[in-house]
Image: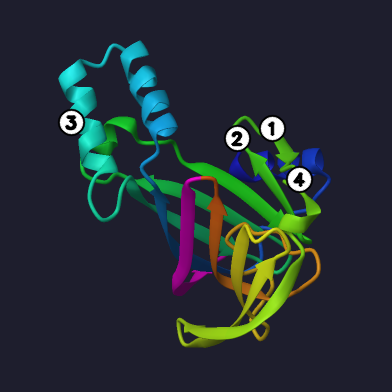
Amino acid sequence: MKYLFFFLLSNLLGVPIIFSQNSKRVTFIDTINVTNDKEILLKIRNSLIEKGVPDDVIEGYISNFFNGANPFLQTQERVAYVYQDSTIIHLNYIPNKNFETFQMSMRKLVYRGGVLYKYTESGVGEMITYESDSSHIFTPTNNSKRIYGYECDEFLSLDSIYRVWINKGLSPNINPGIVLKNISGAVLGFEAKKGNAITKSTLYKIEEAGERF
């Protein structure tokens, strides 16, 4: 049944996904940091009020996550199953402090041929719309850093939203979900700045995963 689902999914997407290939399990750890902003605080407070959360709980929650050195810091495990022709990416938010009450559900993505798709267990998949080409066209910064023992070149998107670290010796299917339109290589880390939110992701483990998805 599981393989029938993915066969139907690949037909729906128009993207053949081969699951009999050996795969690698590549794990990234993300940190998501939102700075203290009055508009964000107001939206969160109003949302919790609508849910019927008591005032003292709301204030305690906001105090916990928006004060201190790392306001609203959350972690996320990002696991990529890397195949010869595609990559399946799991995003799993890890509870932090009292955040388990508001834990988000796991999401899954498919990356193939430089295109990113999303899907649900119902088998409905669609291509993820790009913010703009300038978010996915990169220029070198002439900086580099070592990640998991691999030397990586640093690139910055034209709109300065994304910063990525690329190793050109590894499979380009090692990708945590970043669309690259003009460069090729394995993405071993990235940083994304959108509004008041900053996401940083770094590879920390590569394992053989066999043939099972």
| Secondary element at image label 1 | loop
- Is label 4 in a helix, a strand or a loop? helix
Q: Give how far apart the Cα atoms at labels 2 and 4 are.
A: 13 Å
51 vs 59: above or below:
above
Q: Nearer the viewer, mark 4 or mark 1?
A: 1
**Three-letter code, disc 1:** Val
C-beta proximity under 8 Å, tags 2 and 1: yes
Pointer 4 and pointer 1: residues touching (CB < 8 Å)? no
Residue for badge 4? 10
Q: Is residue 212 among what the camera can see? A: no
Give the residue type at disc 2.
Thr
Q: Main secondary structure of the magenta part?
A: strand
Which residues are drawn in magenta? 196-213
Q: Earlier in the sequence, mark 4 or mark 1?
A: 4
> Residue 28: x and y, percent?
46, 64
Residue 146 location (% of width, % of height)? 49, 85
Give the quarter of the image for residue 85.
bottom right
Q: Toward the viewer: 120 or 172? A: 172
User: Callout 3: helix, strand or loop?
Assistant: helix
Q: How many marks?
A: 4
Q: Quadrant of the C terminus?
A: bottom right
Which label belongs to residue 60? 3
Q: Position of residue 132 (x, y in %)?
A: 77, 49
Residue 198 is one of the magenta-drawn residues = yes
Q: Is 9 positioned to the left or the right of 166 in the image?
A: right
Q: Amino acid at mark 3?
A: Gly
Quadrant of the image containing the N terminus: top right
- Spatial CA distance of label 3 from label 1 is 39 Å
Counting from the top left corner in percent of width and height, residue 95 is at 29, 44
Which residue matches tag 2?
120
